[in-house]
Each structure stands twice: as structure tokens, then as C-alpha cells.
Image (cartoon, helix red, strand yellow):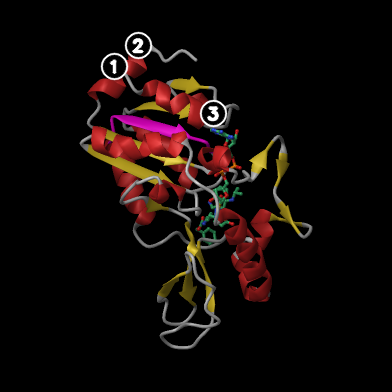
Amino acid sequence: MAISPELRRRFAEARRVLVLTGAGVSAESGVPTFRGGGNTTVWKGMPFDVISSAEMLERNLPAVWEWFDYRRDFMEALMPNPGHYEIAHWQERFPEFTLVTQNIDGLHQKAGSRDVIELHGNIWRARCVACRSTHDMSGTKRPEACLECGDSLRPDVVLFGEFLPPGAFELAAERAATCELCIVIGTSGLVYPAAGLPEIAKSAGAYVCEVNPEPTPLSGICDEVLMGKAGEVLPLLRS
Ligand code: BV8
């Protein structure tokens, strides 16, 4: 895997760096991607963007919980991979480093990343549908109801057709618009508004680099594409 002298130079000199990650960065940890090898994740006959939708939450909250309980159970034992750890190191390396993720698995934080902008929420939290208080579920059973007001809980994730957490995308877009280097890792670039961030960085003059074993709709706007697995490619960037 050849890293161009241009990318090495920019990696060495950049101060303001933004990283956007998707399910691919967690693939080597055992988290199945949503769209790998041409097929889409299906749960009980429903494509994931149907079971993970605002409409389904309205219609059948218990079914939505069953889907997230199932994913939480198998994610419990999963550990970060070298890709996550390399990214965690970058927060010490670059003076102004921003990590934006579409992942809800919390593996970036488990690898030591701080101030992660979680665009689509986190599977280890539940949120009250009434008072919006959140409840940590890591290592504990899911509470039956809100411990503050007793109303029902929902996963603290962003479902299709729902707005992102207040301010999360705005902060990510602001950082994308001022970064010098944008590294896009393990995303198919199909879900918006997240997939719009590399375009914001590109149009603001940043050097945009993609790390993915497969081409994506974003590859065309990238200055450099490193076709490989995150856990194998990212350590190569270390000089
Ligand atoms: C919203 C949480 C406003 C839940 C998720 C504009 C155009 C078209 C559609 C829209 C648009 N704007 C809004 C929409 C609708 C929709 C959308 O984008 N639909 C898509 C399907 C077309 N967006 C929304 O609904 C968003 N909300 O816009 O609000 C609004 C409000 C009301 C009405 C209208 C608009 C909310 C979207 C968030 C949904 N929640 N997750 C859950 O997890 O169940 S999205 C979820 O799917 C993930 O978070 C992620 O974002 C996405 C999956 O994508 P990736 O992470 O990229 O994963 P994928 O499997 O696809 O690809 C993996 C990649 O990794 C592959 O390329 C593979 O090659 C690569 N890879 C594999 N192994 C490795 C690797 N790479 C590196 N290393 C490896 N080892």
C-alpha cells in the first residue's frame, strides 16, 4: 500500500484535521457493516433502514428495542482494533483534531478517543421519550422505564427520518469547513447529512483522503484513495 509523498507531507504538517468514520472502521472488531459485499443488513425480513426508522419507533417500539438489544448483546464483548487505536493517537498528534463518527458502537471511546462527535447517537444509552433524560446501559440491564419520570425509554440513537443531535452536525460541518486534512474511513458515503462532510471539506480546500477496501460515491471527490482495511492502512501513516 503506497502512501504518496503528498499525503505524508500533509500528514506531517497539518494542524487542523477532521476524521469521519463509518461501520467499516469497526469491521475488524467484528461489528458487521450494513452494506458489505453488495447485500444490506436485514432483521427479521426488514432492511435495517426500516427497523431503524422513526416510523417503526412510532408503530412498534418493542420491535425496535429487540433489534437494539440483540446488537448490544453481541457488541458487549467486542474490542477496538488497530484502526481505532491509531485514530485515538491522532488526537495527541494534531493540535486541532476532530473525530466525527456515524457509529453507535462506542469503540472509538473504548480505544481512548475523547470528544467524539457521535452523529447518530450511541447504542449504550437509552433516552426518555418524555423528559429526554438519558440512561447509561453499558454493563447493565436496560431499565424498564425512565428512572426520572417513569415514562417509556427509546434507544438514544438517530433513526432514519429523525434529526441528528442538536448542534452535532453543525459543529462537524464547521470543523470540516476549516480543516486542512480530511480523512474518511470505512463509510459507504450513502447516508446524509453525514456523507456531506467530506464535500464541505473539499470545497473549503482541504486535502481529502479515503480509506476503504472498496470504491464509494465519495472516492471521486478525494485527492487520494487508500484501498485497504483501516486496521492495516492507518498504522502505515505513522512516519
Ligand atoms: C435526517 C443509527 C433530517 C441507527 C443510522 C439526502 C439524500 C437522500 C436521503 C436523505 C437525504 N437527507 C436525508 C435523507 C434520508 C436519510 C438517508 O440518508 N437515507 C439514505 C439511506 C439514502 N437520512 C436520514 O434520515 C438522517 N436524518 O436527514 O434528518 C430529516 C428529518 C425528517 C425527514 C427527512 C429528513 C438520519 C440518518 C441516520 C440514521 N441512523 N444509524 C442504527 O445504527 O441502526 S445510519 C447507519 O447507516 C450508520 O450510522 C451509518 O450512517 C449508515 C451505514 O453507513 P456506513 O457506516 O458507511 O456503513 P456501510 O455498511 O454502508 O459501509 C461500510 C463501508 O466500510 C463500505 O464502504 C465498506 O467497503 C467499508 N469497509 C468494510 N470493511 C472495512 C471497510 N473500510 C475500512 N476498513 C475495513 N476493514
Packing grade of label 2 (10 A; few <14, some 14-19, many >=20) is few
Q: At 29% from the left edge and 16% from the top edge, which residue is drawn?
A: 9
Q: Amino acid at mark 3?
A: Lys
User: Does residue 160 appear in the picture of this structure?
Assistant: no
Look at the numbered discs 1 and 2 and tell me whether their residues touch, using CB distance below 8 Å. Answer: yes
**Residue that numbered label 3 is attached to:** 229
Q: Which residue is mark 2?
A: 5
Residue ID for mark 1? 9
Residue 5 is left or right of residue 52, and the answer is: left
Spatial CA span between label 3 and label 2: 20 Å
Whether residue 130 appears in magenta in the rendering, the answer is no
Q: Is mark 2 within 8 Å of ligand 1?
A: no
Q: Is residue 112 above or below residue 64?
A: above
- The kind of residue on which mark 2 rests is Pro
Could you say where residue 112 lies in the image, as x and y percent from the top left?
A: 35, 46
Q: Disc 1 to disc 2, how far (Cα)? A: 6 Å
Q: Residue at x 50, y 53 (%)?
A: 105
Q: Which residues are magenta?
A: 179-187
Mark 1 and mark 3 lie on one chain; the one further toward the N terminus is 1
Q: Three-letter amino acid code at disc 1? A: Arg
